[in-house]
Amino acid sequence: MRSEIEPGGRKPRSFIEEARRAQIVASAVAVIAEVGFAQASLARIAKHAGISKGVISYHFAGKEELMEEVVTRVYTEAADHVLAEMEGLQDAGELLRTYVIANAAHMRRHRAQIMALGEIFNNLRTAEGKPRYGVQTSEEIYQALESVFRLGQRTGRFRDFDLRVMAVTLSAAMDSMFGYWAAYPEHDLEAHARELADLFERACST
């Protein structure tokens, strides 16, 4: 039987609450992509969503928490898509290519999310004034990539190399790919992803 209390002592959110939070996040993405982080006030996001600012305040403690929810939801949605595309693949080379190409294919359909993420990453700060997101918050991504590289080395598909160095390098290359596409929307993102997959597959292969 499912507990009525979540970890941390909170009651599970209802379907309506989850739907409202998703609506607020979607409006936050749209507003940030359109006017930038600094101009994306809670009042402006509420107006876009067709709700009062108080409704946002009911669901989120403030702008910082809302921005964190945007990042979490965008990454979760992308990860769900990529993992579905990778399901059933056994060859490390195919897994690597699919990871890169599926990420690009997903984000190609969600340009506003890329724009919003860039704004949040560049502007959201901790209480100490340090960037909220960056290398220090990418451990889960690095470990996921390392698992693919480790499989390739174990099966003889990939050569011997430092797993962390390759994971950090691929992650940075993908961030740059999306950043370039954000600046130049006419750029062929999927062609870029194919080139990037070719590059890293050759770099990793025996």
Image (cartoon, grey):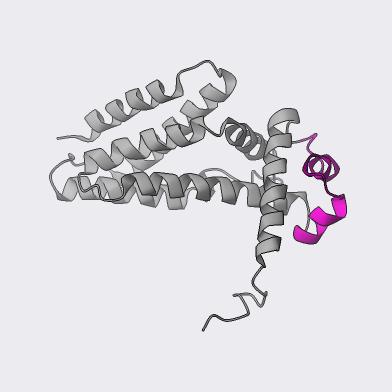
Residue 128 showing in the rendered view: no
Asked where in the image residue 29 lies, by quadrant, the reply is: top right
Residue at coordinates 79% horizontally, 42% vertically from top-left?
A: 45
Q: Is residue 44 magenta?
A: yes
- Which of 160/152 is in front? 152
Task: Give x and y (percent) for residue 11.
Answer: 67, 75
* Residue drawn 86% across the image and 55% down it: 54
Q: Extreme bottom residue here?
A: 1
What main secondary structure does the magenta stretch of the protein show? helix
- Residue 47: where, in percent of width, then height? 84, 41
Is 101 one of the magenta-colored residues? Answer: no
In percent of width and height, residue 79 lies at: 45, 48
33 up-or-down from 88: above or below: above
Determine the residue located farthest toward the top in the rendered image: 186
Q: Report if residue 87 is visible in the image.
A: yes
Tell me the quarter of the image containing the C terminus: top left
Q: Residue at x 43, y 45 (%)?
A: 81
Front position in the image: 110 or 171: 110
Q: Please, is residue 12 above or below residue 131 in the view?
A: below
Percent position of residue 14, x then y: 67, 67
- Relative to 64, residue 168 above or below: above
Q: Is residue 129 left or right of residue 143?
A: right
- Closer-to-camera residue (34/197): 34
What residue is shown at x 64% (from left), y 72% (from top)? 12
- Which of the two residues, 84 or 198, is positioned nearer the viewer here? 84
- 67 sits to left or right of 76: right
Would you say 20 lies left or right of 192 here?
A: right
Span colored in magenta: 38-59
